[in-house]
Image (cartoon, coloured by chain):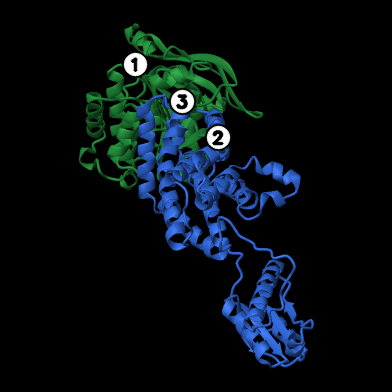
Amino acid sequence: MNLNRIKAIAWKELIQIKRDPLSLALAFLMPVILLFIFGYAITVDVDRLKTVVYDRDMSSLSREIVRGLRESGYFTIVGYVDGPAAIDRAIDGSGARVAISIPEDFSKNARMGRQAGIQVIVDGSDSNTATIALGYLNAAMEMAAKRAGLGTISPPIDVRLRVWYNPELRSRNFIVPGLIAIIMTIIAALLTSLTIAREWERGTMEQLISTPLKPPELIIGKLIPYFVIGVIDTVMSIIIVVALFGVPLKGSVVLLLFISSLFLFGGLSLGILISILTKSQLAASQAAVISSYLPALLMSGFMFSIPNMPVPLQAITYLIPARYFVSSLKGIFLKANTADMLLTEMGLLALFGLIVFTVAVKKFKKRVA
Amino acid sequence: MTGLNNSRAASPDAITVTVAGLTRAFGDFRAVDGIDLSVLKGEVFGFLGPNGAGKSTTIRMLCGLLLPSAGSGTVGGFDIMTQTEEIKKNIGYMSQRFSLYDDLTVEENIDFFSGIYGVSGDKREERKEWVLSMAGIAGRRKVITRTMASGFKQRLALGCAVIHEPSIIFLDEPTSGVDPISRRRFWDLIYEMSSRGTTVFVTTHYLDEAEYCDRLALIYRGKIIAEGRPGTMKKEYMAKEVIEVAVGNVVEALEVLGREGFDVALFGNVIHATVDGAASAQPGIQKALEGAGITSTSIRTVRPSLEDVFVSLIEVS
C-alpha cells in the first residue's frame, strides 16, 4: 500500500466532485430534500381529523363533548348534519373521516346514571388512522364527561400509563432519528456506486489499470472523499433533526458520529462493490437503490417493528446493517444510550464494512475482460 | 526496478518484448490467433492492421490488461502470464480512447499520474515541466483538459503515460482523430523518446505513419501476415509491380480497368494497378482506357508504397 497513490486518487476524486454540479447536488442537496420529504410525510400521528357531528340531543352536555373533541386538536369539526343519510354523504363524499352521532336521550340517560352511548363512525379504509382516532376519541369523551361533572367513570382498577423515552408519544421523535439511517443508506450507496462505473464508461479506467496502482489503494482513495461528504451529511442531518423537527438528542454526539462513520464505511463500500460488479453507471445506481434502500426502509425496524415480523423475516433483518444503525440512532437520540450499550451494534457494523470492503478489493480486477 | 536496470545494461539489440503463440479468444472468436513477435530495445515497432484485426487485443495482453488464452512471452523481462504487475511498473501505456480526466486541468492530470507512478520530490516538478514543454502547453497549466484541441490532449496523454520514464511505451492508435500537423509533431516526440533508448510499440492504421517505424508487423484477422523493415517489406512481399494511372475521370477508369480484369485500387486522385510485369501490362491498360474513350494524362511504373504492399498482402490472405 502506497500512501501517495491513495492521496492522488482521493484528491483527483475530490476535484471531480467539486466540478460536477450533479455530484454536488447528490452529495449535499439530496440528503436535505429527503429529510424534509420523509420527515414531514412520514408521521403516524393523527391530528385535525375532519369530523361531522349529528347531534340529536342538543343539550349542554352534548355540546360540551363536541367542544372537548375540538379542543383536543385531534378533530376538526367540519360540519353538523341532520340525519344518518347525511353522515354517509359526508364520509363518502366530502372527506370527513369521523362522524359523531349523539342520540336524543343522551344527556337524560347520563344524568340518570344509565348507560349513555354515543355512536362513532370512523372511516376504516385507513385502518391505522381509524384505530388511533378511536383511541383519541375515547380519551376526549372521558375528559368531556369529567368536565361536565358526570364522573361516570370510576372503574375498580385505575390504570395509569406512563410512557418512557418519548413521553408525548410523538411519532416524529421515534421516526426521524431512524430516518438518518435511511437517508445515509441511499446517499452512501448512490455516491460511490457511480465512481468506478464512470471510469469504465469514460475509458479512464483502462489507463488506471495499466499503472502499478493496487486495488485497495484505488478503493481507499475513492472512499476517502465520499466518507468526508457522508460525515458532513450526517452532521447536517443531525442539526436538521434537532433544530427543525425538534427531536431531542439525549445521548452523545460523538458516539453518534462514531457509529455513523462505521455505518458509512459499510454503505460506501457496498456502493463501490456494486460499481465494480456492474461497470455501468445506470445499472450501478439502480442496483444501489434496490439493494440498499429497500431493505433499509422495510426491514431495519425504521418503519415496521421487527418483533412484529414473521420469524423468517426477522432472521433476515440481522443481515441488514441499517437495522443496527436505526436501533443505535433511536437509542442515542431517545434513550441516551452509551457506547457500552451499543457494542454489539458497533461490532456488527464494523464487521459488515470490513466484509464488503474486502469483497470489493477481491472483486476488482486490473484487467479489461 | 531491477528489470529496468538489467535491460538498460543489455546490448542495444537486446530483445525487450517477445511473444510466442500469443492467442486471445472471446468465445469462439479468436481476436488474436497464435502470433509471434520480437521487439528490440530502443526501436520504434509499428503494429499495423485494419480495424478489428487484433491490434488493441495484442497491446492489452502485452500491457497486462488482458490475460492471454494461450501462448507465452515477456515484456521488459517479465512474464506476461504471471508478472503483469511488474510489467505495469516498467511500461507506459496510452489507450486508444483519450484517457485523461477531461474535467481536471492540465496540471492536475500531470500531478495525478505523478502520484500514481510514484514520481516524487524534485523529480516531480522536473517531469511536470518536461511534459508541459514537450506538449507545448506550458502556458495552459490551469486549463480544463476538456476544452483543449485533440492534438494537445494527445501530447498531454503521452506525457502522462511516460511521466515515470518507462523503458517501454505502448501506444494504441495514438494519432487517430488528430490533425496532420499534430500527427507529425507526435511522431517527432516518438522519435525523440526512441533516440533516448525508449522502446516504442505503436499501433496504427495510417500507412504513412508505418513508414516512420524501424520495423513493422502487419496483423490481419488475428494473424501476423508480414513482418520486417518498411523498405525490406516493399521488396520482399511485393513480387508484383505497380502502375500508376492518372486520368481525368478516376471513377470511370477504375470501373473500366476492373472490368478488364486488372487489380486496381484508388490511391488519392490516381489509380494503382498491381501487375505481374509492368512492361507487358502497360500497353493493355492503355488499350483498355482508349477503348472506353478515356484519355490518360500519364501511365508510369512507380515504386510500391506500403499501402500497395498491404493491399496485396491482405488480398492474398
Q: In this view, does A369 lie to the left or right of B154?
A: right
Q: Which chain is green?
A: B
Q: Do the residues labelled 3 and 2 touch (CB within 8 Å)?
A: no
Q: Indicate which label's residue lies in the foreground, 3 or 1.
A: 1
Residue drawn at (52%, 37%), measured in percent from left and top?
Answer: A340
Q: Residue A206 in the image: x percent, y percent? A: 46, 33
From the image, tell me which residue sits under label 3: B309
The mark found on residue B42 in the picture is 1
Instruction: Give the spatial CA distance, label 3 vs label 2.
Output: 70 Å
Structural crowding at the residue carrying mark 1, measured as other residues with C-alpha within 10 Å and reported as few (<14), some (14–19) or many (≥20): many
Q: Quadrant of the C terminus of chain A?
A: top right
Q: Mark 3 lies on which chain?
A: B
Q: In this view, does A131 lie to the left or right of B10?
A: right
Q: Can you say whether A223 is above or below B215 in the image?
A: below
Give chain A's shade. blue
Q: Residue B275 in the image: x percent, y percent? A: 49, 27
Q: Mark 1 lies on which chain?
A: B
Residue drawn at (67%, 88%), measured in percent from left and top?
Answer: A61
Residue type at mark 1: give it: Gly
Residue type at mark 2: give it: Gly
The mark found on residue A347 in the picture is 2
The mark found on residue A335 in the picture is none
Instruction: Give the spatial CA distance, label 1 vs label 2.
Output: 57 Å
Q: Viewer-proximal residue, A20 or B155? A: A20
Q: What element carries label 3?
A: helix
Q: Are marks 3 and 1 in contact (CB under 8 Å)?
A: no
Residue type at mark 3: give it: Val
Q: Mark 2 lies on which chain?
A: A
Q: Viewer-proximal residue, A91 or A12? A: A91
